[in-house]
C-alpha cells in the first residue's frame, strides 16, 4: 500500500513488524523516539511514522479495521478508572492475518495540546470544578462570552486531568471552519487521522492525504470508538448545529470518549453539562493585568501607588473582568498610563486594538471579538440585543418585552418609524437565545425573578449598533414610558403593607429610573420629568436621598415657569393627584405639579441660615406660605403638605398649631386614612417639643401608631413610636421613652431603612445616658457615626452632638470639643443653621468645664442670640434659658462682684423663661447647680439672693440685653 500510494517501499523496521504480526509474534517494544510533547510514542508505533506537524497521532498496525488507531492503554494503569470489559475481537477478514490479532498493548498518554506561551492566572477553583465535571459527565460545555478565556481554561483543565485518558487529549479548533459540513473532517484532521507523514532517510517529508477513502464521520467514529480519550471541541458557536450533531453521534458510538466543548451557547445534546465561564473576579483580574502589564512594561505593578491601584481596579471593573479585554488593555501600557487607559474606556473599541498577530483575527481587537458574536445572530436577535443597551443595571423580562418589542403597547411612532418589528410575544424566546449565546447575562434578583443585563463591553457595542439602526429615539422613548409607569404605579404601594416590596422594587430599578429621568430632562419633556419626580419624592424621603431629590427637582423646575413668582395666585383645591394618571396633565394639575417640585426643591436644599434670612428669601417663603391654606385636599398629601415648612421658616409659629389641627380635621373629613396617620404623627412631633403639650402628643402618636399598624406601614409605625418616645422623654419618663425608641428601631430594621434606624438609635442612646447606661450609649453613637461616614446618614449630626455631650460629662473635654468642631462644619454645609446655637452652647459649656470663662462668655452670648429666632423657639424652647445658665457660669468664673451680680440676675431669669412643665435633664441640673454654687461663692448668700430676685421676671429680651453688655 505504501509503494502504491506513496511511491516508496516500507523500511526494514516496518517490514519486521509486519512479519511479526503475520506470524503471531509479540508486539514490538516501544521506540525511544519522542512524540513532540516530551512523551514516548505508544507501543507498537512504527518509528518511521510520526505526527503530522507534531500534532497528529502516529499510525500503527492494529487488530481493529482502522489502520490509524493506536492501541489503548491498560485501564488498570489509569487512576480513578474502573477496568473496561474485554472487547470482542474484530473478524479476521478485517486484516489479512494468518491467526487471531495481537492483544492491546498499553500506550502512554498523548494528544495534540500545544505548550502555552503565557502564564495562566487564577481560575484554580474553576479547573478543579471542571475536573469534577469531566469525571461525572461525558459532555461538558464551557459557556461564556467572547474573550472570557474558555479556550485557555479548557486546555489547562484538560491537561491537568490528562492521566484519566490514556489515549490522549485532543484539541479540534473549529474557529477556522466556515462550512458546517466540514466539521467532521476538521476534527478528523486535528486527530491526525486524515493524513500520514512519511519520513525516510535522505528524503524530504512527504504528505499523502487520504482523500476519497470514505465518509469523514464514519472514519472519525471508527478512530474514536476504541479509544479512551478526551476530545476538545473549541469555538463551536458558529457551527453549533454541526458540532452538536457530531458530539451526539460520537458519544453514542464511542463509549470511552469524553467531549469538552467551548461555545457561546450550549450544544443542546442530551446529557450535556453546562459550566458557565464567568468573567474574572476583581482580585484575579488585577493579577492578570499585573502579569500581562509587566510583560508589556517591565516593572509595572498595579499596586505601585494609590492612583495606579485605583485606575487598575477601574480598568478591570469596566472591562467586566474579561481576560482578553484585560490583555488588550495591558498591551496599551507600552504607551499609556493606567489612568489614561481607564479614562479612554468610553471609546474602548478604538483603544483596544493591539492584540497578538498570531491569534485568530477575531481575537486581535476587542471589536472583532464582539463582531464575531454579532455576525452569528439573526435579525430579531440583533434587534433585541441592541435595544437592551438602553437599560441601566439590567431589566426584568416584562421590561424587555415592553422596550425591545416593536410595536410595543402604546409605542410611539417616530419619523418614518425605522424600528425593526419584533413581536412582544417573541421577546422572551429571543432573550433566552441571547442568554444561551452568552451575550446577555441572566441572574435571579432578590425577589427570585430573573434579571437580564449586558456586560459593559457588549452594552457599548450594542449601543453603537442601536445608533446605526436609527432606533435610539423610539427605543429610549419606550424605556422612559415603561419606567415612568413603574414609578407612578409603585408610589402608592410605599404607603401600606406593600411598602417593603415597593422599596425593593424601586431600589432594583433605580438606575433605570435615573436613566429615564436623565433622558426626559435632555429631551426637555417637562410633563414626563414632573411625573417621575413627584412619583419618586416619597421614596427619596424614605431612603434619605436628599441629594437626588434636589438634583431632579432642580432639573424639573428649570423646564417650566416658576409657579411662586410674584404675583403668585392662590392654589385651587384639587382632590386628584398629579400622578393619578399618566401624562399629559390637565392645566390645573400641571400647575400643581410645578408647585410640587418647587416644594420638594425647598425641603431638599442645603439650608445655611443666611440663605433664609435675606429679604429676598423671606419674601419668597411668604409667597409660598400664602399660596395654600390649611384644609385643602392637596395640603393633606405630599408634596403640597411640604408647604408646612415654608410656614415654619417664615417664623409664623403661632399659626402652626392651627394649621396642624385643620390638616388633621380635613383628613378625617376626606377619608384620607394614611394621610390622617401622617398628619397625626406630624402634629405629635411638633407638640412633643413643648412640655405642656406632651400629653396631647402622646395621644396623637397612639392614634397614628394604631392606623399605621392597621395599614401595615412599618415606616409610619416607627415614626409614630419615635414621636411618642420624644413625648415621654420631655416628661422625664425615660424608661418608657427607651422602650418606644427600641420598638421603633425594630420596625425600621424590618424595612431595611438604614438612615431611619440610625436616627432612632441616636435617640435611643440619648435616653440611655439618663438611665445611667452611658457606656452603652457611647458605643451606639460611635457605631452610628461609623456607619454614617460610609452611607451619609442624616443621623450623624445628632449622634455627634449627643456623643460630645456624653464625652464632656465623662471628663473627656478635648474629645468632646473635636466632635463639636466637626459638627459645626457639618451643619454649615448640610442643614438649617438653627442648630448652630446648639453647637455654640455646647462649646461654651466645655469652655466652662476647662476654666476658659472668657471664651465661654463669648460663645454663650452667640448661642443665646441664635436661640431667639422663631424656628429655634419652636424646636427647642428651653434652649434660651439653658444658655443663660452657661453665661452665668462664665461670669461667675471670671469673678468680680459686678459680673457675679449679673450672673445671679440671669439665674433668676432662667426659671421664668423655661417652658411650662419643662423637666430638666441630668446635665441641665448639674450645670445649674455648678453655676449657682460658683456665683453664690463670689457674692455671698445675701447679695446672691438680692441679685437673683432682681432677675426674676426678666423677659428674654431683657436678659439678652444684659448679656450683650459683655460683648467685646
Image (cartoon, rainbow, N blue to C red):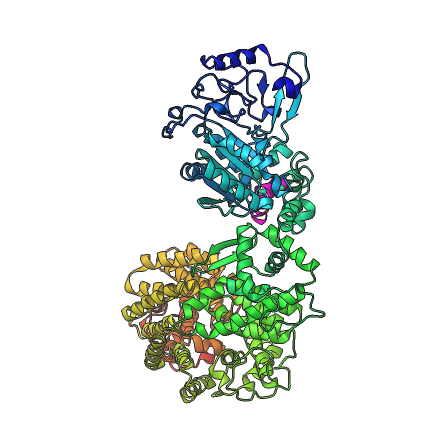
Could you say where residue 902 lies in the image, as x and y percent from the top left?
42, 73
Residue 632 seen in the figure = yes
Residue 536 in sight here: no
Q: Is residue 568 above or below residue 369?
A: below
Give the percent coordinates (x, y) of residue 788. Answer: 45, 59
Residue 324 within the magenta-colored segment of the rendering: yes
Identify the image quadrant of residue 716: bottom left
Q: Magenta stretch: dominant SS?
A: helix
Residue 722 lies in quadrant? bottom left
The correct choice, above or below, for 497 with respect to 377 in the image is: below
Magenta range: 311-328
Q: Position of residue 141 (x, y in %)?
A: 49, 42
Residue at screen point 42% across, 57% down? 816
Residue nearest the observer in this picture, 232 or 584: 232
Which is nearer the eye, 70 or 559?
70
Q: Nearer the viewer, residue 716 or 689?
A: 716
- Quarter occupied by the N terminus: top right
Query: What residue is drawn where x is 50% and y is 68%?
Result: 540
**Does 683 appear above or below 88?**
below
525 horizontally vs 93: left or right: right
Amino acid at each position: 500500500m505504501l509503494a502504491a500510494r506513496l511511491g516508496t517501499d516500507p523500511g526494514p523496521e516496518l517490514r519486521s513488524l509486519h512479519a511479526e504480526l503475520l506470524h503471531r509474534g509479540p508486539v514490538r517494544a516501544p521506540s525511544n523516539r519522542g512524540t513532540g510533547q516530551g512523551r514516548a510514542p505508544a507501543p507498537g508505533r512504527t518509528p518511521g511514522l510520526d505526527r503530522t506537524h507534531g500534532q497528529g497521532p502516529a499510525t500503527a498496525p492494529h487488530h481493529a479495521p482502522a489502520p490509524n488507531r493506536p492501541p489503548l492503554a491498560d485501564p488498570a494503569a489509569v487512576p480513578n478508572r474502573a477496568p473496561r470489559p474485554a472487547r470482542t475481537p474484530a473478524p479476521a477478514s478485517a486484516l489479512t492475518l494468518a491467526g487471531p490479532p495481537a492483544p492491546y498493548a498499553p500506550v502512554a498518554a498523548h494528544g495534540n495540546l500545544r505548550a502555552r506561551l503565557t502564564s495562566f492566572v487564577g481560575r484554580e477553583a474553576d479547573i478543579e470544578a471542571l475536573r469534577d465535571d469531566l469525571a461525572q459527565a461525558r459532555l461538558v460545555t464551557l459557556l461564556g462570552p467572547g474573550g472570557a478565556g474558555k479556550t485557555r481554561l479548557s486546555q489547562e483543565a484538560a491537561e491537568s486531568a490528562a492521566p484519566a485518558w490514556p489515549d490522549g487529549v485532543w484539541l479540534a479548533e473549529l474557529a477556522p471552519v466556515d462550512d458546517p459540513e466540514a466539521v467532521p473532517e476538521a476534527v478528523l484532521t486535528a486527530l491526525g487521522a486524515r493524513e500520514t507523514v512519511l519520513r525516510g532517510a535522505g528524503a524530504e517529508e512527504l504528505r499523502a492525504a487520504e482523500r476519497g477513502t470514505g465518509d469523514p464521520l464514519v472514519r472519525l467514529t471508527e478512530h474514536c470508538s476504541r479509544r479512551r480519550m478526551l476530545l476538545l471541541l473549541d469555538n463551536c458557536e458558529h457551527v453549533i448545529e454541526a458540532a452538536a450533531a457530531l458530539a451526539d453521534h460520537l458519544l453514542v458510538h464511542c463509549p470511552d470518549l469524553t467531549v469538552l466543548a467551548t461555545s457561546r451557547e450550549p450544544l443542546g445534546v442530551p446529557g450535556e453539562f453546562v459550566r458557565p465561564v464567568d468573567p474574572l473576579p476583581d482580585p484575579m483580574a488585577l493579577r492578570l493585568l499585573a502579569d500581562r502589564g509587566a510583560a508589556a512594561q517591565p516593572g509595572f505593578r498595579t499596586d505601585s501607588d494609590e492612583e495606579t491601584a485605583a485606575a487598575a481596579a477601574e480598568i478591570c471593573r469596566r472591562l467586566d473582568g474579561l481576560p482578553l479585554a484585560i490583555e488588550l488593555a495591558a498591551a496599551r501600557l507600552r504607551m499609556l498610563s493606567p489612568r489614561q487607559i481607564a479614562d479612554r474606556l468610553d471609546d474602548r473599541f478604538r483603544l483596544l486594538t493591539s492584540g497578538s498577530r498570531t491569534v485568530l483575527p477575531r481575537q486581535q481587537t476587542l471589536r472583532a471579538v464582539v463582531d464575531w458574536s454579532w455576525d452569528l445572530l439573526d435579525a430579531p436577535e440583533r434587534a433585541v440585543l441592541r435595544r437592551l443597551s438602553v437599560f441601566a443595571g439590567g431589566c426584568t423580562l416584562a421590561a424587555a418585552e415592553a422596550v425591545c418589542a416593536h410595536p410595543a403597547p402604546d409605542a410611539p411612532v417616530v419619523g418614518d418609524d425605522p424600528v425593526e418589528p419584533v413581536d412582544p410575544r417573541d421577546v422572551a424566546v429571543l432573550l433566552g437565545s441571547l442568554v444561551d449565546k452568552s451575550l446577555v447575562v441572566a441572574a435571579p434578583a432578590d425577589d427570585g425573578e430573573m434579571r437580564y443585563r449586558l456586560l459593559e463591553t457588549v452594552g457599548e457595542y450594542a449601543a453603537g449598533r442601536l445608533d446605526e439602526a436609527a432606533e435610539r429615539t423610539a427605543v429610549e422613548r419606550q424605556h422612559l414610558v415603561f419606567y415612568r409607569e413603574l414609578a407612578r404605579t409603585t408610589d402608592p404601594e410605599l404607603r401600606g403593607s406593600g411598602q417593603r416590596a415597593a422599596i425593593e422594587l424601586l431600589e432594583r430599578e433605580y438606575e433605570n429610573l435615573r436613566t429615564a429621568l436623565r433622558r426626559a430632562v435632555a429631551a426637555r419633556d417637562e410633563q414626563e420629568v414632573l411625573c417621575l419626580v413627584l412619583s419618586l419624592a416619597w421614596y427619596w424621603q424614605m431612603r434619605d436621598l436628599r441629594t437626588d431629590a434636589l438634583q431632579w427637582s432642580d432639573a424639573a423646575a428649570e423646564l417650566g415657569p416658576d409657579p411662586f413668582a410674584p404675583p403668585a395666585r392662590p392654589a385651587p383645591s384639587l382632590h386628584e393627584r398629579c400622578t393619578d394618571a399618566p401624562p399629559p396633565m390637565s392645566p390645573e394639575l400641571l400647575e400643581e405639579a410645578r408647585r410640587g417640585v418647587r416644594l420638594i426643591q425647598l425641603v431638599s436644599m442645603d439650608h445655611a441660615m443666611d440663605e433664609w434670612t435675606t429679604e429676598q428669601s423671606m419674601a419668597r417663603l411668604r409667597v409660598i406660605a400664602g399660596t395654600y391654606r390649611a384644609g385643602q385636599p392637596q395640603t393633606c398629601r405630599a408634596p403640597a403638605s411640604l408647604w408646612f415648612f415654608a410656614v415654619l421658616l417664615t417664623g409664623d409659629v403661632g399659626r402652626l398649631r392651627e394649621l396642624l389641627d385643620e390638616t388633621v380635621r380635613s383628613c378625617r373629613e376626606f377619608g384620607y386614612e394614611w394621610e390622617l396617620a401622617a398628619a397625626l404623627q406630624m402634629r405629635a412631633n411638633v407638640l412633643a417639643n413643648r412640655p405642656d403639650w406632651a400629653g396631647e402628643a402622646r395621644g396623637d402618636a397612639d392614634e397614628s401608631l394604631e392606623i399605621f399598624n392597621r395599614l401595615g406601614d412599618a415606616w409610619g409605625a416607627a415614626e409614630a413610636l419615635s414621636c411618642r418616645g420624644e413625648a415621654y422623654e420631655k416628661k422625664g419618663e425615660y424608661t418608657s421613652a427607651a422602650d418606644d425608641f427600641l420598638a421603633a428601631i425594630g420596625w425600621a430594621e424590618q424595612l431595611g431603612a438604614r438612615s431611619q434606624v440610625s436616627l432612632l438609635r441616636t435617640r435611643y442612646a440619648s435616653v440611655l445616658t439618663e438611665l445611667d447606661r452611658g457606656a452603652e450609649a457611647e458605643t451606639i453613637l460611635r457605631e452610628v457615626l461609623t456607619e454614617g461616614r460610609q452611607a451619609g446618614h442624616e443621623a450623624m449630626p445628632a449622634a455627634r452632638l449627643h456623643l460630645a455631650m456624653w464625652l464632656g460629662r465623662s471628663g473627656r473635654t478635648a474629645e468632646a470639643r473635636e466632635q463639636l468642631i466637626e459638627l459645626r462644619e457639618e451643619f454649615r454645609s448640610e442643614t438649617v443653621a438653627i442648630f448652630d446655637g446648639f453647637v455654640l452652647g455646647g462649646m461654651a459649656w466645655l469652655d466652662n468645664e476647662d476654666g476658659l470663662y472668657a471664651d465661654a462668655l463669648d460663645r454663650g452670648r452667640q448661642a443665646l442670640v441664635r436661640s431667639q429666632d422663631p424656628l429655634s423657639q419652636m424646636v427647642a424652647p428651653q434652649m434660651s434659658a439653658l444658655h443663660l445658665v452657661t453665661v452665668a457660669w462664665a461670669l461667675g468664673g471670671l469673678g468680680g462682684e459686678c459680673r457675679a451680680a449679673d450672673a445671679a440676675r440671669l439665674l433668676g431669669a432662667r426659671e421664668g423663661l423655661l417652658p411650662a412643665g419643662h423637666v430638666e435633664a441630668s446635665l441641665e441640673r448639674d450645670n445649674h447647680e455648678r453655676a449657682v454654687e460658683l456665683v453664690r461663692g463670689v457674692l455671698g448668700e445675701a447679695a446672691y439672693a438680692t441679685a437673683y430676685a432682681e432677675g426674676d421676671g426678666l423677659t428674654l429680651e431683657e436678659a439678652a440685653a444684659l448679656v450683650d453688655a459683655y460683648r467685646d
